[in-house]
Image (cartoon, grey):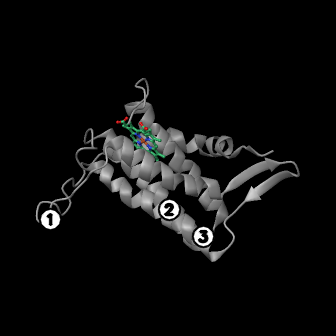
Amino acid sequence: MLTITRSVLLLLTGIGSALLVGCNASKEPAAQEGAAGAGPTLELKASTAQLMNWILDARADVVWASVGSIITEKGEEQLAPKTEEDWAEVRNAAATVAEAGNLLLLAPHVRDQGDWVAMTRKMIEEANKCVQAAEAKDLETLFTAGGDMYLACTACHAKYVLGEPLKD
Ligand code: HEC
C-alpha cells in the first residue's frame, strides 16, 4: 500500500508564492514571432490541450515524482533522485517544460499579450529553477521550485480554464 502525499506537500509549500504570481508578473509584450519572420516556417501541430498533456504535464510529472515524501507501510520516506542518470532525467524534463513553455507564446496557443504571457514566463522561470537545482543536485530548491512551477500551471488554469471543462 502506497499513499502519495506529494501533491499536498507541493500545494502547502507554494502557497506563499502563489500570492506573488499576479503582482510579480512582467507586463511587457512577448517577442512573439521570435526568428520566425526571417527564418523557416514553424510547424506547430499540437493543439493547446495536446501541448499540455503530451509535453508540459508529461514532463512536469517527472519533476514532481522525483522529490517529496511518500507514506509506505514502513513510514514516511523521502524521495530523491539518486544516480547521475536520475538527476539528468529530472533536469531534462524540467528543461523540456521551460523550453516548450515558449510555444505557449506563439499562435495558435497564445490568448493575449498580458496575463497569458506573464503566467507563461512565470512557469518558464520556475522550470528553469528546477533545471538549475537538478544541475546542482539541490533537493530542497528542487522541491520548492517544483511546487512553484505547479502553482504557475494552476494560476493560468484558474484564469483561462476554470469553469470550462478540459477537452482534447
Ligand atoms: C499560460 C497558461 C497556461 C499555463 C502556464 C499552463 N497551462 Fe495547462 N492549460 C491551459 C489551457 C488554456 C488549457 C485548456 C486547453 C484546451 O482545452 O484547449 C490547459 C489545459 C491543461 C491540461 C488538460 C489538457 C486537456 O486534456 O484538456 C493539463 C493536464 C495541463 N493544462 C497541464 C499543465 C501543466 C502541468 C502546466 C505547468 C507545467 C500547465 N498546464 C501550464 C493553460 C495553461
Residue tagged 3 = 87
At label 3, the amino acid type is Trp
Total marks in image? 3
Instruction: Give the answer, above or below, for where 150 lies relative to 129.
Output: above
At label 1, the amino acid type is Pro
**Residue 35, x across and y down, in percent:** 18, 64
**Residue 51, x across and y down, in percent:** 37, 48
At label 2, the amino acid type is Ala
Q: Mark 2 vs ligand 1: CB under 8 Å?
A: no
**Residue 50, x across and y down, in percent:** 38, 45
Query: Residue at 58% of width from left, 49% of height from top?
Result: 147
Instruction: Say whether disc 2 or disc 1 marks the residue closer to the N-terminus.
Output: 1
For residue 1, side relative to residue 165 (left or right): right
State the residue in front, 83 or 9: 83
Query: Residue at 37% of width from left, 57% of height from top?
Result: 100
**Residue 65, x across and y down, in percent:** 63, 54
Q: Quadrant of the C terminus?
A: top left
Q: What's the mark number on residue 40? A: 1
At numbered mark 2, what does the secondary structure look like: helix, strand or loop?
A: helix
Q: Which residue is most to the top? A: 163
Q: Are marks 2 and 3 in contact (CB under 8 Å)?
A: no
Instruction: Say whether disc 2 or disc 3 marks the residue closer to the N-terminus.
Output: 3
Instruction: Give the answer, above or below, for where 54 lies relative to 19.
Output: below
Quadrant containing ligand 1: top left
State the residue in front, 11 or 96: 96
Q: What's the mark number on residue 93? A: 2
Query: Residue at 25% of width from left, 50% of height from top?
Result: 106
Q: CA distance from mark 2 to mark 1?
A: 27 Å
Instruction: Say whether disc 3 or disc 1 marks the residue closer to the N-terminus.
Output: 1
